[in-house]
Amino acid sequence: MRFIPVSCTERDEMLETVGARSVDALFDVIPPDVRLNRSLDIPGGMGELELAAHLEELAGRNRHSGNLVSFLGGCCYDHYVPAMVDAVLSKPEFFTAYIPYQPEVSQGTLQAIYEFQSMVCALTGMDVANASLYDGATAFVEGALMAARVTKRRSFVVAGTVHPEWRETLGTYCDAGSYELAECPASGGVLDLGVLDTMVGDGTAAVLVSSPNFYGNLENLVEAARIAHDVGALLVVSVNPILLGVLEAPATFGADVVVGEGQPLGNEMSYGGPGLGMFACRKEFLRAMPGRIVGRTTDVDGRPGFVLTMATREQHIRREKATSNICSNHALNALAAGVYLASVGSVGLKGIGEACIAKAHFLRERLLATGRFTASWETPFVNEFALRFDGDVAAMQTAMLERGFLAGLDLSRFNLADEGLVLFAVTEKRTRAQLECFIEEVASL
Amino acid sequence: MYPKNLKYDREHEWVRVEGDVAVLGISHFAQDQLGEVVYVDLPSAGDSVNAGESFGEIESVKSVSELFSPVTGEIIEVNEGLGDAPEAVNEDPYGEGWMVKVEMSDPTELDELMSVDEYKAFIAEEA
Amino acid sequence: MSERPVREPLTGRLIFEIGAPDARCVEPPIVDVPVPDFATVLGGQKRKAPPALPQVAEIDLARHYAHLAQANFGVDNGFYPLGSCTMKYNPKINEWACRLPGFAGTHPYQPIDTVQGTLELMWGLQEALAEVAGLPAVTLQPAAGAHGELTGLMCIRAYHAANGDPRKRVIIPDSAHGTNPATVTMCGYEVTTVPSNERGGVDLEALMAALDTDVAALMLTNPNTLGLFDENILAITDAIHAVGALAYCDGANMNAIMGKARPGDMGFDALHINLHKTFSTPHGGGGPGAGPVAVRDFLAPFLPGPLVVRLEDGTFGLETPEHSIGRMRSFNGNVGVLVRAYAYVRALGGEGLEEASEQAVLSANYLKERLKGAYSLPYDRTCMHEFVLSGKRQRKEFGVRTLDIAKRLLDYGYHPPTIYFPLIVEEAIMIEPTETEGKATLDRFAEVMLRIAEEAERDPDLLHGAPYDTPVRRLDEVRAVKNLDVAWSPKEA
């Protein structure tokens, strides 16, 4: 049988030791009225050759970044992944291990996480980072929940310019936990700070923003921080980490908690998951943080080593009073991010960020020049931008798909008021030739 | 290991009575069970506390325990020294390891507590 | 006599401490468009000081991670009987499959007709999980077991709310995983803990006493964390339903019962399944996993969207249920993990899954029989896929703790079992061999465990000092908390 190395003879020997007449007899401890007295109706039993062919056939029915030129973003991006990343991720010592409960034989995982935490701190300017959460959306939620613990308040104000799925996720958690959630509207592609000022109060635990925001625009974080801090609330900022070689660290602007979707850092898109929830904050909130944290220490012989630390915050110890219920996190995705950042280095990260931003600005300018698109605002943006198309967006996208392009994200799918807006993301992978071809084709529609 | 002049409760706290004030800490037995104490979370002076209710938490590397007050009253002083040196709870549980001072509103609550001999018998049973 | 050469340690030297400012692994990309003035286009948010990331040559990077890997231990390195975590072998075909560009290179907002292969795969997995669970509706959204618990409990909460019957409490047995009570709190409920009985199951009398119309749900792991199947399961779920509450099953231990018994048939209304346990996806050094949730019909309208549906024309689409609690995350689930689980399901099929559970249970019972003389066995019954020993005799008689036994196992090249869990067993040693280990491996492990029991008796200090032969030895966890160092800072350079 597949993946079971015990032979029939060995199984009989084992049964004899156990004193059972058959394997099925071991299941007599299950009351007969809940036993399933038939086989599971699940097809399979495929040999590896047939299975591989079946999986290739399924994968072959998808179109993907290898045969499409993609301008899709919205917190999941088609960036280049250096060969080093998968070489490390494919090492079974990493991917077939679990939570490093036994530090003596888990130093590889532990040190890699410590290095990841250090890199997240370096990017964001925060003091401490955890070992990862599931994705950007859940990290965003955990930022809000931590702010509630720290401030002992129960209401949040979230910017309407945050990714719609993240706002929805925050709403789901707030409903269940009975937190108040209000949404501050956008104005000109960014958060309306004047309105924000009127929405916060002494019950506000956190102001939650994203910069760049869902439209690719940069928010005024200094002002958002002032508004939050004036009422004793925390500022939770979501970032796109791949841009932090170019963009100032959010700590500089007064962020208290920085979260982000780490997929751009060496993780495949994989239809949206697994991503990587990044979470960093100021030192004084350490005891309120969710998730695992690795610390550096020494062993009995004085050698440096790493352990899971501050574990009394977590569910396996503090149970119903834990800072979060998270157990399994996205450690392998954090490893990918660490290998990615070490591969590109500070110089490379800056270069990648600059390439994305330069190409996005080039594309936007040229698309506007076609006369088929109009801008709804002029405000600083980075690797993504939204423009209004002067025709049927769906028809344009279908036509461009036939020409091999994923022509951006139709924002009407999120029921935003901005019907007709298309969000274009440009990564360093897009060449000038691809951009020019796209511009030419879309102009000719 | 168990000073005679103190009173003890079933949650392994000790009480030293100084007039209307009760000084609270945890016993040698409790600190030994916990292992090395790495953090003590205490209330602020001015907070009130009720007998039988939690007034703080004490942590070792892999455990968290609540601290229960055997008396009702107002916290008038907190051992700030435990912030930097929580190990005092292990090294000197009845001295430097004290936790809070409570101005008692009902000193008769002390009658419920155990004498040292009663406490020794109690922990012998628990072990 | 010459001095013994000292080998450079595998770990400890940080990536930040190797390399040089001009070292490169990957060169920055060429920018073939006009470069804007970044200070202007970024509206004053241009970074002044670069982040302190390493600059390392490719070969040094390759060796750094090779060394870290050498200091690690995974299922491919040796036996990993970590109870409650189902550390079964992770088939190589799974890893190959999830990396196929058609799966790995798809964007979550691609047009539906360009991702039919992925959607069919997800739909097939939903169907298979529903069949294993005995519950008809499945969401693949949750990213992990705990995330699945929260999803399931939120659906239950929404169901009660829709009935105009909000409730306050969730009942959990004292043997539960810590994620259960933590989830209850996040869902805005209070925890009521019920004790276990002398046979390791739920204490029925205590359960009855805790039940009233304030109870929203029971969360129960069955088989439970002692590796025991609760014989009273139908009485338990009946009692829960009798007060209008629902029964949630923590499916962490599904590896014991595939094709043998289904949570839906036990009276559970909702269940999560850990794909990284039962369905062979790798644990990744802590994750990512996936925690799909299966529910009864009447909970299906509350599931988080999107779900994969098969349309009348045979194609596949995404839909969000009518009364959905809302999203639990971004996008469509941990699809890279789902691909691996699907590959496993198709490799085994229904019969293969049943055989996996059969062997998992036989192997656990076999090891239990071999070890129960040397260690205490608090619940001496036929176990399911795992069992819990107690090191209390070693502790009492020789002053050797379960932690010492675990550390000694490292010297013999084994990953230790789960220790000190469940909390209701003193000095607990929780062993889960899984079906993917051969008899020879189980025999060698049993012999080592017996030898360690002898060592504990003969030379307790040997165990107190263990491990001796690992990349590092016991670490100072107190120091880690007191002199907290959780991030390298460039000041150290």
Image (cartoon, coloured by chain):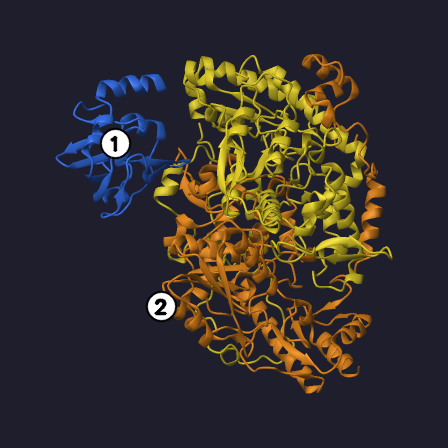
Q: Residue furthest right?
A: C313
Q: Chain of mark 1?
A: B
Identify the residue position indicated by label 2 in the image: A230
| Total numbered circles | 2
Determine whether A84 is above or below A387 in the image. above
Q: Are marks 1 and 2 on the same chain?
A: no
The blue-tinted chain is: B
Quadrant that contains the N terminus of chain B: top left
Identify the residue position indicated by label 1 in the image: B91
The orange-tinted chain is: A
The yellow-tinted chain is: C
Q: Residue at x 72, y 28 (%)?
A: A34
**Residue type, mark 2 in image:** Asp
Mark 2: few, some, or many residues within 10 Å (few <14, many ≥20)?
A: few
Point out residue C56 in the picture as x, y percentages from the top left corner. Answer: 53, 57
Residue C415 figure quarter: top right
**Left or right: C184, with B106 as reference point:** right
Point out residue B127 in the picture as x, y percentages from the top left corner. Answer: 36, 19
